[in-house]
Image: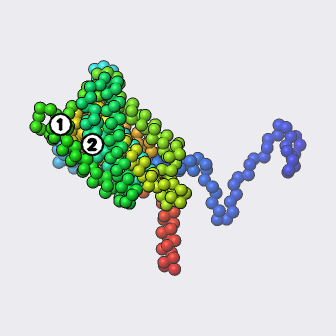
């Protein structure tokens, strides 16, 4: 075997010389391994942050479940004598509570047959449908830089328009369902467009506009329900509205055994696809994102910011109207009432925030909140206050809105934005003291 000289290739079969290790100059830090960089970027990502926020909220919720449990309270009276009893009681309370949540929202292993076992999952999807639709409306407005608090009013007006225009019609189901659906979506779109138009023409803040329009919509619907000849149920003097005609109700997807899963969920999936395509792939969506990022720069680029505001609120209202139709035309409906929105209009804000104003993120957040709502009924059977579920939802949003707190709890690496802010603060402090 001949020796290979520098600058020449070794003969066939010879082992190449080993690669020289990294030699850093004095004071130079070697670059981190590529795997470390990938892991750090994953930990900084919004998906990991969202998952950890849910985990932390569930942990805090478990503490609240333990504190409100009667067995834990009784065992804590002699904690220092037998601490194991308190710990065991707390574990049983938390386990039984979250097991009931899973059993009521995902899969019930105690069901008599397969249909009974998977019914909780279909209930979750049914509860999630209006949350997703209204959340998409709020999320779309967020992407344009608008804070839409008016999903409740848009839902109520959609219900009112659908009831006034279509409930008295004698139509077959294949025609009555789409006519009612279109009327409700148009009503919600009109109510949202009013806020968008006032924002564009007068510069009034959309938060004030939408909150006030919520009140207008609520009392307008209440007046219609109390007025004979409008939406009041015939033959009564009470504030009772029309029942939804059977020909206008969404058909159940999987039969009578799964009453909460109906055509409305399919429509919500289609709406999610539409919003994703609109924001991420269409030319109008590009202009919307530009306005949301910087309206002044968008205006300088020739984009009509006022027109985008109107378009955004119109579409947001239409999606809220779809949520109202899920409530009104759902397979299990009580007809027109002033509380038909069931708090969904405000829960939609939470869903949009958790979904980070992305179409599929909002879809997943709606499924999560639908699961919490479906499972809360089983948790009540375990003597757990239903308010615990509301606390968990609130904590999820709190931790999502406070990433530095979440990173501190789980020892996650700081984001580039936080590092830049800290560096600027140090530089400013140094300049002041200099």
Mark 1 lies on residue: 229
> Is 324 located above or below residue 173 in the figure?
below
Q: CA distance from mark 1 to mark 2?
A: 19 Å
Residue at 28% from the left image edge and 39% from the top image edge:
161
Question: Count the marks: how many?
Answer: 2
Q: Nearer the viewer, residue 385 or 251?
A: 251
Q: Nearer the viewer, residue 168 or 36?
A: 168
Q: Residue farthest to the right?
A: 2
In primary-sequence order, the first of circles 1 and 2 is 2
Query: Where does residue 20 sit, x and y in percent of width and height?
Result: 73, 52
**Local crowd size for mark 1, using a 10 Å CA cut-off: few (<14), some (14–19), many (≥20):** few
Q: Quadrant of the N terminus?
A: top right
Q: Is disc 2 placed on a helix, strand or loop?
A: helix
Residue at 22% from the left image edge and 33% from the top image edge:
335
Residue at 82% from the left image edge and 40% from the top image edge:
14
Q: Residue farthest to the bottom?
A: 434
Assess whether mark 2 and mark 1 are in contact (beta carbons under 8 angstroms). no
**Local crowd size for mark 2, using a 10 Å CA cut-off: few (<14), some (14–19), many (≥20):** many
Query: Where does residue 72 sit, x and y in percent of width and height?
Result: 21, 43
Mark 2 lies on residue: 156
Q: Which numbered mark, 1 or 2, is in the foreground of this view?
A: 1
Q: Is residue 425 visible?
A: yes
Query: Where does residue 308 sit, x and y in percent of width and height?
Result: 45, 51
Q: Is disc 1 placed on a helix, strand or loop?
A: loop
């Amino acid at each position: 075997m001949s020796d290979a000289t520098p600058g020449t290739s070794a003969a066939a079969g010879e082992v190449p010389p080993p690669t020289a290790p990294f030699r850093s100059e004095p004071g130079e830090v070697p670059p981190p391994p590529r795997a470390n960089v990938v892991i750090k970027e994953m930990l900084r990502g919004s998906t990991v942050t969202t998952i950890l926020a849910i985990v932390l909220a569930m942990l805090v919720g478990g503490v609240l479940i333990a504190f409100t449990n009667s067995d834990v309270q009784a065992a804590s009276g002699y904690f220092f004598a037998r601490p194991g009893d308190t710990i065991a009681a707390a574990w049983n309370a938390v386990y039984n509570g979250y097991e009931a949540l899973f059993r009521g929202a995902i899969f019930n292993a105690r069901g008599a047959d397969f249909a009974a076992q998977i019914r909780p999952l279909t209930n979750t999807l049914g509860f999630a449908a209006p949350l997703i639709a209204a959340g998409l409306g709020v999320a779309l407005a967020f992407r344009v830089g608008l804070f839409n608090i008016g999903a409740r009013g848009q839902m109520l007006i959609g219900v009112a328009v659908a009831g006034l225009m279509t409930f008295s019609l004698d139509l077959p189901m294949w025609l009555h369902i789409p006519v009612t659906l279109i009327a409700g979506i148009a009503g919600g779109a009109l109510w949202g467009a009013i806020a968008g138009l006032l924002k564009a023409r007068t510069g009034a803040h959309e938060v004030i506009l939408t909150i006030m329009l919520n009140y207008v919509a609520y009392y307008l619907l209440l007046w219609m329900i109390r007025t004979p000849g409008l939406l009041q149920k015939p033959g009564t003097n009470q504030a009772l509205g029309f029942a939804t005609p059977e020909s206008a109700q969404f058909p159940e997807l999987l039969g009578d055994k799964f009453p909460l899963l109906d055509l409305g969920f399919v429509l919500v999936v289609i709406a999610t696809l539409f919003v994703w395509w609109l924001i991420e792939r269409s030319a109008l969506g590009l202009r919307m994102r530009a306005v949301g990022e910087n309206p002044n720069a968008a205006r300088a680029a020739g984009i009509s910011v006022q027109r985008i505001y109107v378009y955004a609120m119109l579409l947001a209202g239409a999606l809220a109207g779809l949520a109202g139709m899920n409530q009104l035309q759902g397979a299990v409906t009580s007809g027109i009432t002033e509380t038909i929105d069931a708090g969904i209009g405000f829960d939609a804000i939470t869903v949009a925030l958790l979904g980070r104003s992305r179409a599929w993120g909002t879809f997943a957040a709606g499924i999560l909140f639908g699961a919490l709502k479906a499972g809360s009924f089983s948790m009540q059977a375990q003597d757990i206050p239903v308010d615990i579920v509301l606390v968990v939802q609130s904590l999820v949003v709190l931790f999502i809105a406070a990433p530095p707190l979440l990173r501190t709890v789980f020892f996650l690496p700081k984001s580039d934005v936080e590092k830049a802010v800290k560096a600027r603060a140090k530089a400013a402090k140094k300049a002041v003291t200099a």
